[in-house]
Image (cartoon, rainbow, N blue to C red):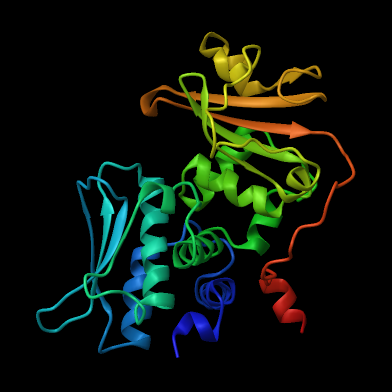
Amino acid sequence: MPVSAQMGPLRRANQLTQLLDLTKGLDRYPVDVEQLAREYSRATAADDPIQDIVTEPLKGFEGALVPLRADPGGWLIVSNVLATPGRRRFTVAHEFAHWVLHRHLLPPEGIYCSEEDVSRRNGEDIEKEADTFAAALLMPLHDLRRQIDPRAKPTLADLGALADRYGVSLMAATLRWLEITERRSLMVVSTEGYALWARSSDPAFKSGRFIRTSGPPHEIPAAAGAMRPDLSSECRAGITHPPGVWFDEEVEEFTVHAITFEKVITVLHLGDARPLWRTVEEEHEPDVIDRFRL
């Protein structure tokens, strides 16, 4: 039976988190995911371990888990040398997840993961499972809650501190925070005045606050800080917009213009509101602290 059929990605990541907490202590971040992948795979599957982890220039994909045919066999993890260190760390964790959860399900050539699968947390099926595992392993729920209260309204500086602590990109840290926050908030990634993709927190989504990017191009509002690189300092510090700019309600915007990557990263905070609908509940994320209370 495949590993993923026996235990979901959150519980597998949580098991490793408990192991790391016990052996390395609670202030052990960022996770040395390459060392973990090598040592864990050799300890649990000595005849089929991860033999090496390399970075190479990649075109068309961000990372891969590839079987090694020559003796002694095993697997190779590849990440994109052109990516930032934070993105590479998440990619390695993503490919490690494929080894833990899916290696018995993969085709003979292994699996090659695109930027959308990894960086945007927007994959399907086993790619979604690998993203879920990687985020929970690198940014565990119990530690994330200690850094930022789920009811707090973080600034870009707060989210940047999360990224530094966990050794991941600002986008990865913000996506993870959006999964646990009780606030109505969104992240929008844009370029040249149009949204590339966006993600809402669960409370924001349930109140109807989301941005569709799968259809026609979504134009960024002209009055938004995301359209004003000349106001980069003000955008980082936070700008409050009246109703009618982003949505028909007041919105607080924090934006960083990542000129090097030709992308604009925007975090939007909204006020309280009642949900318009309920969503289907997915697998509950176990908290290490909750597990110890059982």
Residue 230 location (% of width, % of height): 53, 8
Residue 143 location (% of width, % of height): 64, 60
Q: Quadrant of the N terminus?
A: bottom left
Q: Residue at x 72, y 39 (%)?
A: 185
Judge from the rendering whether residue 102 lies leftward or rightward of residue 156; answer left or right.
Answer: left
Q: Residue at x 76, y 51 (%)?
A: 150
Residue 69 quadrant: bottom left
The residue at the far right in this view is: 274
Residue 205 location (% of width, % of height): 73, 45
Looking at this view, is 158 or 27 the one in front? 158
Judge from the rendering whether residue 145 lies leftward or rightward of residue 213; answer left or right.
Answer: right
Looking at this view, is 206 or 241 the one in front? 206
Q: Quadrant of the C terminus?
A: bottom right
Q: Is residue 217 above or below residue 230?
A: below
The residue at the far front in this view is: 216
Residue 33 location (% of width, % of height): 40, 64
Judge from the rendering whether residue 67 lies leftward or rightward of residue 172; answer left or right.
Answer: left
The residue at the far left in this view is: 70
Residue 225 quadrant: top right
Residue 50 quadrant: bottom left
